[in-house]
Amino acid sequence: MKLRHFVTFMDLSGEEVRKLIRRAVELKQLKAIYEPLKNKSLGMIFEKSSTRTRVSFETAMIQFGGGAIFLSPRDTQLGRGEPVEDSARVLTRMVDAIMLRTIAHRTVEIFAEHSRVPVINGLSDRFHPCQVLADMQTYFEHRGDIRGKTVAWIGDGNNMCQTYIHAAQQLDFKLNIACPQGYDPEIELIQQAGQHCTLTRDPFEAANGSDLVVTDVWASMGQEDEQALRIKAFANYQVNDELMAVAAPDALFMHCLPAHRGEEVSASVIDGPQSVVWDEAENRLHAQKALLEYLLLPNPGRRIGD
Ligand code: CP
Ligand code: NVA
């Protein structure tokens, strides 16, 4: 079986993502005990905090009959300067897969270059592919295939936004991004996306007629010092009832969480009828189970009921 990683959303074709979503929905409905990863272990390196990513991967491994090992730089040799390359060489001779949440995206890439087992990006400064996989599952469950639909990204051109740029290309939807000046996603990513992506300063223009409205915090992890500056810069980029009113009447609202009510999203929207954020959070578990199965097992779908 060829070694596959999930470092960015581009590591899976649109066809593969659709297959994984179907499988995630199937696994979500499965009531029987199903332990395809018995005796297998997932190493999880966290350079940053996490609630959803840690608990969903750890639960996925428990439910699949295996186990997950939480590794923090604080209490491993990674925090004392052992090179990433060496850590990758050593850890991947022991565990069956590795999930990393890193400050620098390059760390995930270096790890993958020296790994013997699948490497999964659990968030870096540039991308958050596992979250967008769960977002896509959530959209498909509520509204069907996202092909040809319009998604509005409102706010920071951050790791989530940049992963949506990839997803728009792989799943063939239109992404309208509205960011304040100085907070754009990487220009090369927008250029690569071609017709799939537009960039504006006007959130109402981006949200107009859209089928899905997505936002994220204004200051990501590691940007806490810029919080005050960002609150000013993003003041006109709140997703609220006024903005949702220009989207399609059946538009959904998503946020990867954690959210700051009253900043990037009003309480009325995130706690309102168009919000699917709790399904989105739950789907981290199901989408990642489908991903683990896909990366670790040959012919995963056939194993149910064996
Ligand atoms: N959305 C997300 O990745 O959440 P955590 O930071 O809690 O893992
Ligand atoms: N953009 C956010 C996402 C958190 C899940 C961050 O990087 O902190």
Image (tube, rainbow, N blue to C red):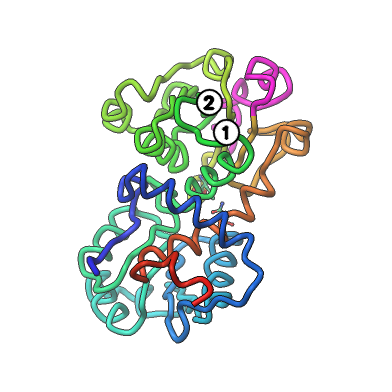
Foreground: 218 or 229? 218
**Residue 171, image quadrant:** top left
**Which x, y percent locates residue 258?**
63, 49
91 and 226: which one is in front?
A: 91
- How packed mark 2 is, by other alpha carbons closer than 10 Å (few <14, some 14-19, many 20 or more), is many
Which quadrant of the figure contains the N terminus?
bottom left
SS at mark 2? strand
The residue drawn where x is 32% and y is 28% is: 190
- In percent of width and height, residue 245 lies at 70, 17
Direction from residue 127 to residue 252 in the image, left or right: right
The residue at the point 43 percent across, 43 percent down is: 159
Q: Is residue 261 left or right of residue 88?
A: right
At which x and y percent is residue 279?
66, 49
Q: How crowded is mark 1: few (under 14 residues within 10 Å), some or many (20 or more)?
A: many
Identify the residue position indicated by label 2 in the image.
152
Q: Is residue 144 above or below residue 304?
A: above
Is 223 above or below relative to 130? Answer: above
**Amino acid found under the numbered disc labelled 2:** Ala
CA gap, disc 2 to disc 1? 6 Å
Span highlighted in magenta in the image: 227-251
Membership of 239 in magenta stretch: yes
Reply above or below: 222 against 252: below
Q: Where is residue 47 in the image (x, y as percent from the top left)?
A: 44, 64
Tag 2 and tag 1, C-beta contact below 8 Å = yes
- Residue assigned mark 1: 214
Magenta highlight on residue 46: no
- At 39% across and 63% down in the image, what residue appears? 294
